[in-house]
Amino acid sequence: MRLERRETVPLILVATAPLIAICAALLLAAGLIAAAGVNPLSAYAEMLRGALGSRLAVTEMLTRATPLILTGLAAAVAFRARLWNIGGEGQFYVGALATAWIGHTLGLPGPMGIAVLMVCGMSAGAVLLAGPAFLRLRFGVDEVVTTLLLNFIVILFVGLMIEGPLRDPLAFGWPQSVPVDTAYRLPDLVARTRLHIGLLLAIAAAGIVWLVLTRTVFGVETRAAGLNARAAAFAGVSLPRTIMGVALVSGALAGLAGAVEVMGVTGGVTTTMSPGFGYAGIVVAMLAALHPAGVVTAAVFVATVFVGADAMSRATGVPSFIADVIVALSLLSMLVALLFTTYRLRR
Amino acid sequence: MMDALELLTNTSLWAAVLRIGTPLIFGVLGALLCERAGVLNLGIEGIMTMGAMAGWLTVYMGGDLWLGLAVAAASGALMGVVHAGLTVPLGLSQHVSGLGITLFASALAYYLYRLIVEVGETPPAIVPFQPVDIPWLSDLPIVGPILFQQTAPTYVALIAVAVLAYGLARTPLGLALRMTGENPHAVEAQGLNPNALRIGAVVAGSALMGMGGAFLTMAAFNSFFPEMVQGRGWICIALVVFASWRPDKALVGALLFAFFDAYQLRLQTVVDGVPYQLFLMAPYVLSIVALILVARRAEVPEALMAPYRRGER
């Protein structure tokens, strides 16, 4: 039994790989649900009902999917160039922090202010990732650990700011930041729900990223650097410039996720506003096989699992952590599924 | 300023260094073993969480403390099997597989904990490892409290350092493992199986990581709560580079780091006006600084992260 490389990659396998991965994950998680004494099929039915069963449920799910699309894009762009950006969580928080900080006292008319704040969030995220990228390029320091450690540093920093300079005087001690000006809150997409136009912004971002990755020189260079950096260098691709460019784009996308979340959902920053959007974004990117269009679909799937698991937990008593288990298993299964798109088993 | 320096003379600080350093020692040794054989194991954070939960749960359900430690090691080893299975024979991305294991092991740990343990006001507690009482040595003036009043797992960690240092440097198995991380083709040429060696190293390393996590719930604290590993796993990955992949330097690195962590905690009591978050940030910032300092002359195992496929160049 050995693995043999395929000559061509059949598109149908790439398209069905995520589905197979998700099915495998759901199957394995079903075992854990059964261990809780609950029928997995009814549990999954509750999960679907909880995420898709009503107008409110669907809007909640899509609200949850919005930041996931953006962090998923961030991870996808970075991983394409083999820049292991695990710092999406931290970049999300600095984007949110920058938005709340500047958005509190900006003083520009609504739509202009929103645009400016989005740029602020993106810049904050980009700068944060630029650090580890620089350390990798200049000193050869692996970016996995530096981006990860920065997550912890950033969240502590956010706590520091919320308890200090950015404390909300009207919050009566509740740990949250000053709110962003109401003029800069994103309008609702569906009335009387939390779904805001940030969803459209995220989908538009996916479109833009796809265009950049497939139609620009930068995009092709990114791909080349990720596939074979040495060969790309011979072809004239400057690795330092490409990596830094990718880092700025990836960090900006994650920072934008934070900005959009502040302007669309929370209105300010708290230390718990992200239930792991950065890390989930990595799973989203992998499930999408690093393709921007797939990121949107994968984000919807992950959001469905998380939102649905809450409802399922209330209905059946299965701990809601099953959502994290399913998402993690999806990642691992997707890895294996992707392997079989490029290799086949031979006796 | 004087207060800050006076803290250094306090024996409880140095005792704390060994205590805080123990999970780090286990973690660094485990990561070092995996990487020396050529596999990066980013699952460490999740494996430590899983070990913490599994060990604690064993004791909570009536088991012996040592059984708990063994179960923690076994749970780590199990996760190691998964990671090894994905990265060694299948040759999948070690970064993504490791991250997946971290996410999976943590999620599984929280899920099983919530499933089995009643949720109450405060997390339930077990009776953890107590500091040992060695007849004559524990009563020595300064060295006594620091070196001879630690909990049992700390001594296990120190023994593990010695075993690994000797084993890697002086035994045939150690040589084979080191070779696997530098040049698996040479291992194959010797008639050994590099993939089997790698799998073994990853499983053993993950078992060590699991024990490191168990120390948190069975000696340092006495209950399990989410996010208790607090990034120590990632710090261990950084420390492996800092230790140049050597067990003796790993001990030094872990203790050095533990010193800064212990010191920072006590510094908070004597320094006014500085937000506590800055102190808590210090360990992570220091890890990054340590990485930058050693990155230039790091002697990375040559075959680290390169899957070995027989017959391929």
Image: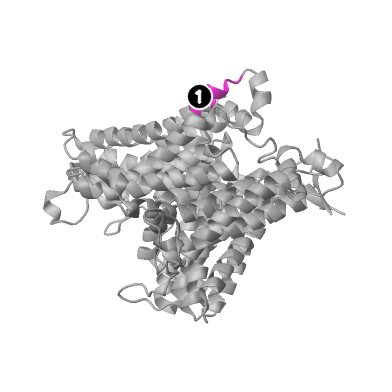
**Chain identifier of the residue bearing label 1 in the image:** A
Q: Which class describes the residues within 10 Å of circle 1: few (<14), some (14-19), or many (20+)?
A: few
Residue at image point 30% right, 51% down: A271
Does A206 sit above or below residue A193? above
Give the image location of residue A214, x and y in percent: 57, 31
Residue at image point 35% right, 50% down: B262
Quadrant housing residue B282:
top left
**In the rendered structure, does residue A175 fall within the stretch colored magenta?**
no
Secondary structure under badge 1? Answer: helix
Three-letter code for the amino acid on which mark 1 is drawn = Arg
Q: Nearer the viewer, residue A84 or B145?
A: B145
Instruction: Specify the quadrant that holds the C terminus of chain A.
Output: bottom right
In the image, is B42 to the left or to the right of B146?
A: right
**In the rendered structure, does residue A238 fall within the stretch colored magenta?**
yes
Residue at image point 30% right, 59% down: A193
**Numbered label tally:** 1
Quadrant housing residue B150:
bottom left
Magenta highlight: main SS? helix
Q: Which region of the structure is painted magenta?
A: A237-244
Q: Nearer the viewer, residue B125 or B247?
A: B247
Does B225 sit above or below residue B175? below
